[in-house]
Amino acid sequence: MNALTLPDIAAQATRQALPLEWVGMCGIALPILFDGQRLSATADAGVSLDDGEARGIHMSRLYLALELLEQENLTPHLIRRVLEHFLDSHQGLSTRAYLKIDTDLLLKRPALISPLSGWKSYPVSIEAHLKNAMFHVELKIQLPYSSTCPCSAALARQLIQQQFVDDFANRSLQHADVLAWLGSTKGIVATPHSQRSHAQLRLRLVEGVEALPLIEVIDEAEAALGTAVQTAVKRADEQAFALANGQNLMFCEDAARRLHLAMKRSPEITALHVRVIHAESLHAHDAVAESRWNWEAA
């Protein structure tokens, strides 16, 4: 008995000739290697379908090309090789290839004062396009931080001043009395409000960059903000965190400007889009600010 040839439906002509911008798969589970870590990730992979007469693409070829990501450290060069595999396996059908990788980067962060440390998770996405030998890579990184409202801090200071006047009016000031007053709840009658906040960074990398600067970007962003959320802490660390918040009072507008300027200084970044979200503890809504540089033209 002769073996039957399996039908290739994708190679058949379509009844409605029309090119398609993007065809592929989303949410493919796979492991990736980055900076010595094996991370769980998902990938979106696709190509254009430029031949409007073709019924479809060969999705299994895209899936198999992703195996390269399991074997080597994730770099722009490796991502480009994967995209080239996409196009090589679709000659005559496609001229554009796309890959997006979503994962959580785990970084061990030291406490501010004590020798403690703990792991912090940073959601990251890497998007890449290849068209007519033009290769572009974009990073998306989300990081949490704390923000203390400057207006609230000023109002709290005014209340403390008024309480000082009320408690020490017509009294001679004694150092011990003032020191005790400053350390009591009676003296510090108000505190400013703070909130956990998030920065969303979208960054386009310059052509030819050899490594994905994920850790460098996170370090620069947290240094610019000055109030990165902590992992394991002792009381000395919590006190240092309170000091950092007091010295880095910021509205969402301030945070967006700090991040914009810090990211723009990087020689590896050619365009950026910054979005910060302060989950208000005073209001039931969020405060949001955005900034772009070279984004539309990129």
Image (spheres, helix red, strand yellow):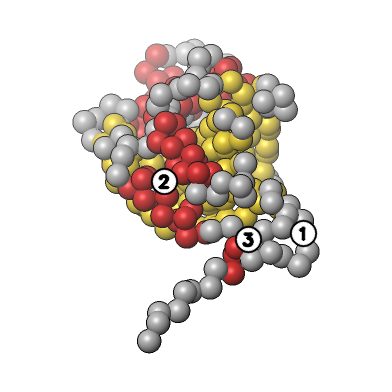
Please tell me which of labels 2 and 1 falls first in the chain.
1
Badge 3 crowding class, 10 Å Cα cut-off, few under 14, some 14 to 19, many 20 or more, is many
Q: Which residue is mark 3?
A: 56
Q: Amino acid at mark 1?
A: Ala
Q: Amino acid at mark 2?
A: Asp
Do callouts 2 and 1 mark residues in contact (Cβ within 8 Å)?
no
Badge 2 crowding class, 10 Å Cα cut-off, few under 14, some 14 to 19, many 20 or more, is some
Farthest left residue?
115
Please tell me which of labels 3 and 2 falls first in the chain.
3
Mark 2 or mark 1, whichever is nearer to me: 1
Q: Quadrant of the C terminus?
A: top right
Mark 2 element type: strand
Asked whether 93 or 108 is in front, the reply is: 93
Alpha carbon separation for disc pair 3 and 2:
33 Å
For residue 132, what is the image quadrant? top right
Asked whether 174 or 269 is in front, the reply is: 269
Residue 134: give x, y in percent of width and height: 59, 29
Farthest bottom residue?
1
Residue 234: give x, y in percent of width and height: 28, 37
Q: Residue 6 — which label? A: none
Q: Quadrant of the N terminus?
A: bottom left
Q: Which residue is mark 1?
A: 17
Residue at 40%, 79% (x, y): give it. Answer: 3
